[in-house]
Image (tube, rainbow, N blue to C red):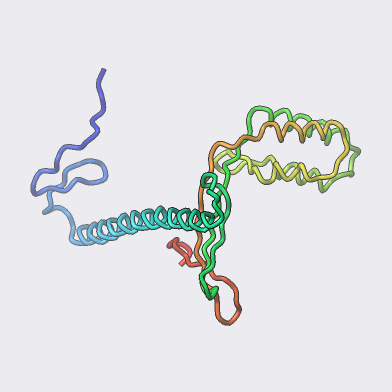
Amino acid sequence: MTTEKLTKDPVPAGYWRDANDALIPITKVKAIDKDRDRVVRDLCVEAQKASAALLAFKLTAMQSVIDFVNRSLAEYDAKLGGKKGNVTLFNFDGSFKIVRAMQENLVFDERLQAAQSLIAECIASWSKGSNDNIKVLVNQAFQVDRAGKINTGRVLGLRSLKIDDPKWLRAMAAISDSTKTVGTKAHIRFYSRDDMSGEYIPIHLDLASI
């Protein structure tokens, strides 16, 4: 049984390794290819540094918010029960705002299939032309995205529909029973207030948003 090499052999002096793992003499590499390599390599190295700095900033910011909330609660001899809970903080003059949000990662177990089956039976039993809007909502709720995942918000939203059909009620119970929390993800967002409109404008930390 052979094991795949985890590291590549060093490139000999006077050669470059191309994308196909072939060794190319530097004298055979065109000037424009060398220029392109330098631009891409330099920018990506800087991007890696910026990404690491953003991650370090996020972790520091999260901890700073937790520490502040604990100091604030300490005035009432209370302690924060874990990291759960959304928090919104303003500076003294209200020119800046920080929002720390905790988002639960919800998934469905196999009992969601029972809910889908019961809902299908409900739709089949309803008279033609009735509840068309509900049918559309149901079809949208169980659509999957490119990753093959169901939108939990749309599925859970079906429970808010006022329908007295016994099968529908059993389906909604199956949805509730099938819902599981498999983790919590923290988000932190920063805002500055526009002096003219008074609205809070996001301080973007995503290159695609700048």
Query: Which quarter shows the C terminus?
Result: bottom left
Relative height, residue 135 to residue 61 (above, below):
above
In this view, which residue lies farthest toward the top?
1
Is 156 left or right of 148, judged from the image as shown? Answer: right
Please state which of residues 22 and 68 is positioned toward the viewer in this rendering: 68
Q: Position of residue 105 (x, y in %)?
A: 57, 42
Name the residue at 18% across, 58% down.
30
In this view, which residue lies farthest toward the bottom?
196
Q: Position of residue 114 (x, y in %)?
A: 73, 28
Q: Position of residue 135 (x, y in %)?
A: 80, 43
Is 8 left or right of 104, judged from the image as shown? Answer: left
Q: Quadrant of residue 81?
A: top right
Relative height, residue 133 to residue 119 (above, below):
below
Is 2 left or right of 73, judged from the image as shown? Answer: left
Please state which of residues 32 and 142 is positioned toward the viewer in this rendering: 142
Relative height, residue 140 to residue 50 (above, below):
above
Q: How many marks?
A: 0
In this view, which residue lies farthest toward the right?
127
Name the residue at 54% across, 60% down.
99
Is 126 left or right of 90, judged from the image as shown? Answer: right
Q: Quadrant of residue 163?
A: top right
Name the residue at 16% across, 47% down.
24
Relative height, residue 21 to residue 191 (above, below):
above
Please state which of residues 196 and 8 is positioned toward the viewer in this rendering: 196
Q: Quadrant of residue 147?
A: top right
